[in-house]
Structure formats: structure tokens, C-alpha cells
Image: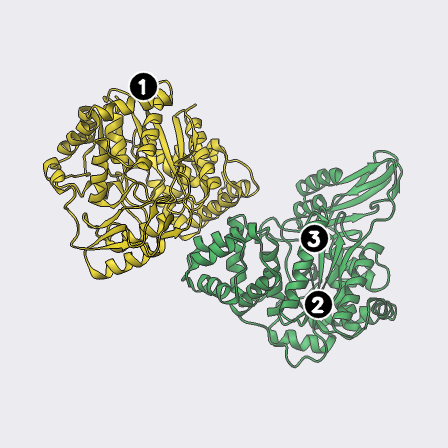
Chain colours: A green, B yellow
Amino acid sequence: MRTVDCIVKKRDGGELDSEEIAHLIRGYVDGSIPEYQISAWLMAVYFAGMGFQETGYLTREMIDSGDTLDLRGIEGPLVDKHSTGGVGDKVSLILAPLAAACGLKVPMMSGRSLGHTGGTLDKLESIPGYTTALEPARFRSIINEVGYAMTGQSESIVPADRKLYALRDVTATVESIPLITASILSKKFAEGAESLVFDVKCGSGAFMKTPDTAEQLASFLVETGRSLDKKVAAVITSMEQPLGRMVGNFLEVEESAMALQGKGPSDLMEVTMRLTAWMLVAGRIEPDVDSALRRCRKELESGAAYERFIKNIELQGGDPGQMEAGFGVRRADLSVDLTAGEDGYIQEVNAYKTGMAGVYLGAGRSKTDDDVYPDVGIVFQKKCGDSVEKDEPLCRIFARDEEGLDQAQRLMDDAIVLGEYGDASKEMILKELPVE
Amino acid sequence: MRTVDCIVKKRDGGELDSEEIAHLIRGYVDGSIPEYQISAWLMAVYFAGMGFQETGYLTREMIDSGDTLDLRGIEGPLVDKHSTGGVGDKVSLILAPLAAACGLKVPMMSGRSLGHTGGTLDKLESIPGYTTALEPARFRSIINEVGYAMTGQSESIVPADRKLYALRDVTATVESIPLITASILSKKFAEGAESLVFDVKCGSGAFMKTPDTAEQLASFLVETGRSLDKKVAAVITSMEQPLGRMVGNFLEVEESAMALQGKGPSDLMEVTMRLTAWMLVAGRIEPDVDSALRRCRKELESGAAYERFIKNIELQGGDPGQMEAGFGVRRADLSVDLTAGEDGYIQEVNAYKTGMAGVYLGAGRSKTDDDVYPDVGIVFQKKCGDSVEKDEPLCRIFARDEEGLDQAQRLMDDAIVLGEYGDASKEMILKELPVE
């Protein structure tokens, strides 16, 4: 098979078959196909797209390029959730113990903060003692014991994705929906998930800025997953403003603990409950979303979900007592309140700018080797649609140094927009693509 | 400047400015930009196209990547002609002495046969003693003496084109009109032409199969040339059937000599005269095509053009007497006549298949290092629109070996199509894009 013929076929709008995709990916990984041919193919994919089946072949080849996690021996439906990334997105911290309390097994592999988006691993590691570096055997045993475990991605999983991503990054081919789809799905399935629920974020703080692109990605994830005989659902959720009222690492642990005790903000609870409900449906524990939602509410109210949370922390080396002692008080030394300059209503809390403020504070990273701090961040008193009076506080910023405080303050001044009229309640769930 | 930003801009439909184009081409030639970024940019160009001005920047950078030929000291308007390649295309051999006889200076750099298309250098070198390997000083002095000289391309001219072409070849980005345009123009202008007339061939034997793509290329050549302040015209000519009645190397020299003595076939003469006339207009020797055509006819009829042809052969080391002695008799030993299987009219003489028959005979090359023979080829007795009777000869094939003869015969059997009705005369000049 000639590589250039595969490129021509894609360039001219054809769908590559499984042999052609295998030729490209295996050849790229083993070095027999040069990068300049792969990058030409990637750009052709950017323009000409890929079919669902073709994206499935790519996903399969990427999975086969490395190890897969063996989760045999775990009883119960293995369901994971994946978010495309947002600001204040602590959904995983709440959803995993809640789903476990409902009877699912959740093998959750998460990422770290990069750019304006937060990272679940960074948040978890702000819990004193908590480790996310788990050997596979330990990962399995914690899932067996408490229903879920939280870890990072293994280096040996999907090496083709790392290699392709590095090339896409320097050849302007990151923003291709089928390539994004194959990258996400290959990692998730290599990590052993049988079923998956996607939280496709849409808005200023999301990778997908428009409902249209979010829906395209959601469709690709669901349809490609189906072509691989996996149960996949997707929920498109709003990421115009930060999710919940806290942005930061330990701040988000605190808000998650509150949520697990029934005291979470409504936007966060709505998104989390809906995603968890879809997981129960995907895992065949509940027949439909409505009964799944009832089940979720029950496990929250009974305290079972919070119990799982505490138990997981203990099993992953953390100290729940020290964590709880930090709630409300573990804050960086410097702080400032942003106040309203006039009476009015909050029109916008720009999620992207809030996320970038988090980077300047040290809650997130601009480069992969930056340090992050547990105790910096932003706590909102007001969010979109709320009325405010002149001089009323809008949010409080916690910082470790004056420079970070200044820059975050400047960004947040810009992020929060006041106006004369209050908007009605914001839709959080924009669209649902159910399990087949 | 970041290379990836240039790729993003092109991918998103922007036009790169001169600095961005310079960054890419210089970086590629000096090795500071990796091939995988250049190939991604090339594929983005394939899909998103380029503007005329942008193509001009690319042409300019490619010219600047190497030497340019210094043709100062030559008096008179320097005008060259370039053909996109065809079958039986011996136009250069006739046009150059004719244009020179009319007062132009023609610095002609030609190519060799590859694939189904013939090569001017191969044809010229079938003249006993004729050399096309001329040092620049000798090239200049022959032009000064007889008005034109014929040579091959120097290795030191436009190295960026050779490097880019090699990459395009393996990344499925050859078929991009702006990239083809920059490749052609950069070589021609680096070779010292002030004005250019393009013969954009269109049809089964041409690179551009449809009038639409031929017109796109012609427009790009003319408009990009203008953006570089050069005088450029283009003529789109038909290449459905071979041009003239002879295909082969020495056979085409013979037909060219006949044409220069006023005995050329009408299709060949029409194309050649029209292109030469546009050269006279581009070189400001004649005010319009009609007066230029009258001038061409005069120089043909007076014998001045044929005189230049003979003089050039002497200056380039050839033996005109030996050449003329070969006319009508210098033919490969094996031959066969193809005859009509029934009464009828010639509907088609497929130029591509004829060209491929030439490759099997050894008139052309399938690989760049193949040998070519002077005395093989095809002589047509009939062409499109002619009436034939059963058993009347259609063409004669001359070959060096039985295998070549068999394969060429099979191809020609297929190439020549008979039918019940005669088509009216075929248009040779499909469109003209005049000098501004």
C-alpha cells in the first residue's frame, strides 16, 4: 500500500478503510512513514472530514498502538464520564462517588489543568495526602472496594495519540472533530471503560464555542463509540460562565464536598445529576433518566455518596479530617473583593477570562511543567442573572502574590459585565444524545 | 514569526503576506522549518487556495532561493514560451526560429520527456551532433547571433522548487493550481524571460483535462505574472488528439522542419502561429495579434525562419545536412500499419494513449533515467474528422523491438475510435488571455 494513495483518497473526500488506517497509524508509530506524509493526511482530514466508521477504525488503531488497562475481576457495570474541559468544572469529584453509591464501577482517569481549563488531578491532590499515582492493581482494588478510583493516564496507553497530538499541535490540525473524537475515545476505551457519558461543554470557557460545533463533536463521540460497539451518551452543557461558585483547587474540593452533602449550587447540581443519571442508564442500572435522577437524589440525601467520597480519600492516601478542617479557612493570604460599580444585574461572567485569572493566580497552568497551588482561586457571590447593588461584592480573589492578584483582578473586572436588566435563568443542559 | 500561525492563517482561508511566505520558503530551504509543517501548509493551500498576489510572493521567494540567469547584454525583447506539456507538441522547435526571424530574442529552457508527454530536449538531441548542454556564456552568445538558443534547466536555478516538488509528490499536493503556477513562473523568470506566453494544453493528453481547470491555470499564470510586473499572455489549446501527424523524437524534428518550410499540418501551424504572434505582441514588436500573424506568415514564406533553424543547429553542434538526409528514411527497423476495420470517420485519436504508446516504443520515458531512441514513433495518415475506408491505413508505428511494437499497437488500436459520422473541424484555440 502506498501512503500517498491514502492521502489522495482522503484529500478527494473518500473514506479510508481499516487497512488504510492501519497502514498510516502503524507506519507512523513504527517510523516507516515520515511525519510529512502524516501531517499532509491530517490536514486533508481537517478539510475533508472523516466518517463515523472511519473514525472508529482510527480509534481502534490508536488503542492497539499501546497497552490497555485490564479491569477484569471488577464486578458491576464499568462506566466512565469524560468532560471536554471547562472552568469550575468539579463534576467528576461529585459524580464519581455518587455513581458508585448508585452501584456503578467508575474507573476514572483524569487530566491536569492546562490553559484556562482546570484539572481533576490538581484538585484532588489539594486534599492533604491524596495521591492519584496508582498502580493498576491498586486502582482495581480501590474500585472494587469503594466503587471508584481516580488516577492519571498511564504513559503506556495510546502512544499513537501522544505522537499524533504533538504533530497536530505544530501543524494546525488540532481543531478537527474526527481527530478529537479518536483521541478522546481511544484513551477512554484503552482505560477499560465499557460505557461512557460525555460532558461536551459549550461556550466561552469551552473548547467548543458554539452549539453547532459542540453538537458535531457530541455526535461524533456517540456515533463513533457505537461503531465500536460501545454504549455512549453525550450531554451538551453550558460553559458560558464558571460552573458553581468556586474556582481553584482546594476551593473546588470544598464546593464538591458541600454538593455531596446536598448544599451544591443549582447549576453544578443540575449538570452533575444529569450526567450521573445518564451513566446509570448507560450501565443498565436504571431504565431511563427520570428514574435514574430519583436514584441519584436518594443516594445524595442518604449521605451514601458523601460516605463514598470520604472512603475513597482514605483509600487514596488522603486525610478527610484535615480536608474538612480546611473548609472555609484554607485560603491564600492575599485577597481582594471585587464590588459592583453601580446597581444592576449580572449579564456575563466570562468563563474563559475567569479561567485565565486562575492561571495567573497559580490555580492552573500555562505550561505543563508549571506548579499549581491548592489555596488560590476565586469565590463568586454573584452569578449571571443576579441583581446587585452598588458596592456589593461580586467575587473574592485569593492570591499568593501581588502580581497574580493584580492580573487576576484586571481579568475579573473585565469578565464580569453588569447591565440594566436581569436575564431569565440560564439553560445548563443544551442537548442530550441518549444511549442507543 | 511562528510557522504554525502561518499554517493556521492559510487553513482558515487567509492570504499570507510577503513576510509569511518568505518565512516558510526560506525556513524550508535552510532546514529550520521541518518538512511536516511545510506539507501541512501545502495541503492547506490545496484546499484553501492562494491569491494572485500571494502566489506572486511565493514565486518571488522561489526565484530568490537560487541563481538567476543574467541575460543582460542581449539586445531586443526577451520573450519565452512555455507549454504545460502534450503529445506531438513540437511547437517550440518551430516557434523559436520563427519568433527569432521576426526580431525577438528567445532564451528557451526546455524539459525532457516524462510519462505520456514528450520533451523538447529529447527531440532536439535526435539531430545528429546537437547539444542542449550550453554554458550560460555560450547560451547568451547563440541568442545574440541567431535570436534563440535551446538548453536545459540549470541545477542551481530555483532549488526551492525542486525541494517543494519532491515533497508535493509524496504528499498528494501536486495538483494545486497556485503551486503549479509558482513552480512554472519561478523557473521561467529565473531563466531571464521578461515576457512569457503560455500554451496551456487542455484535453486527454494534457495535465489539465477540462476547460475549467485549464482556464484556472491560465488565469493564475497571467495574473500572478502581472503581480510581478511581467508581461504574460496565455493561450488555451486543444490537446485531445496528438498535435500534428508525427509523434517521436526525430519524427517531430522532421515535421518541424516541414512546418518551417510551409508544409506543416494545419492544427500544428494554427497553434504555433498563434503562440508566436502573442510573443510578438508581448515583446512589443507588433501592436496586435492580426498584424503579428501577418508578420509570422511573411517570415515563414521568405524562408527566414527555416534559415534560423539551420543556423541554430550549426551553432549548437548539430549537422543540418545529416539531419535533412534522415528525413523520410531514418526510421526504426520494425514497423506496422494500423488499418481501419470498417468504413467510417475518425471520432477520436486519444492523445494520452498515443503518448503512452510512445513510452512503450522508447520515444518517451516512464522513469527519469530511461533511455530514449530517436527513430521510433508514430506517423498518422488520418486524424479526427477524416473519412476512412475499410483496410485504409490509419497510422504507422515504428519500433525497435517486438514487445514495444505489440504494446504500442494495442494502445493505438484503443486510441483510435471510428464512428459513422464525421465531426466538423476541431477548434484548436480554446481561449486567449491577452497581454495586459
Mark 1, residues whose alpha carbon is within 10 Å: few (<14), some, or many (≥20)?
Answer: some
**Which chain does the residue under circle 1 lie in?**
B
Mark 2, residues whose alpha carbon is within 10 Å: few (<14), some, or many (≥20)?
Answer: many
Where residue B195 appears, as percent x and y from the top left, is 35, 26
Q: Is residue A365 left or right of residue A169?
A: right
Query: Which label is found at residue A134?
Result: none
Q: Secondary structure at mark 2?
A: loop
Q: In front here: B316 or B355?
A: B355
Q: Are marks 2 and 1 on the same chain?
A: no
Relative to A173, say whether B17 is above or below: above
The kind of residue tagged 2 is: Gly
For the C terminus of chain A, which image quadrant? bottom right
Q: Which residue is mark 2?
A: A318
Where residue A132 appears, as percent x and y from the top left, is 64, 66
Give the Cα distance between marks 2 and 1.
91 Å
Q: Which residue is mark 3?
A: A214
